[in-house]
Amino acid sequence: MTENTDPNADPRLTALYLAEEQACAGYVAARKVQIRLGTRLVSLHRLTVEQPRRADYRQALTGLASRYRAANERTRLAYQRWQRAQLCTDGEWTDTTGRTRGQATTAGEAA
């Protein structure tokens, strides 16, 4: 069984990179939902302004606004998780030989 990983890679750092990538994917997914709901909200708001007597439009607008606020909060939290994951990865990278590995390889090749 062959693996395409660096045998000198720090498993903690690799796990943190993976966690950071997953947090980023969560943020991107939440942001897409937020944008989609925001677009629908603007469209429905225009319909409500054009036809103010339509109670069903106003009711739908109220429900959609609530869903948009929830999506906005999920996006904000997902972004914070992504930032925390980045900080954890950066801290671990700084504390390990990850930051000096490139220099050691270059120095080894020069010798």
Image (cartoon, grey):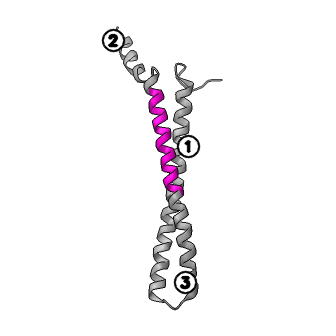
Locate residue 95, reporting x and y percent.
45, 23
**Circle 1 sits in a helix, a strand or a loop, which is it?**
helix
**Circle 2 sits in a helix, a strand or a loop, which is it?**
helix
**Numbered label attached to residue 110:** 2
- Pair 1/3: label in front: 3
**Circle 3 sits in a helix, a strand or a loop, which is it?**
helix
Q: For the residue marked with disc 1, what is the amino acid?
A: Gln
Residue extending farthest to the right is 1
Residue found 43% across the figure and 26% down from its top = 94
- Pair 2/1: label in front: 1
Residue found 49% across the figure and 44% down from its top = 82
**Numbered label attached to residue 57:** 3
Magenta region: 74-93
**Numbered label attached to residue 22:** 1
Which quadrant of the structure image shows residue 22?
top right
Dot placed on the residue nearer the N-terminal end, 1 or 3: 1
* Relative height, residue 76 to residue 54 (above, below): above
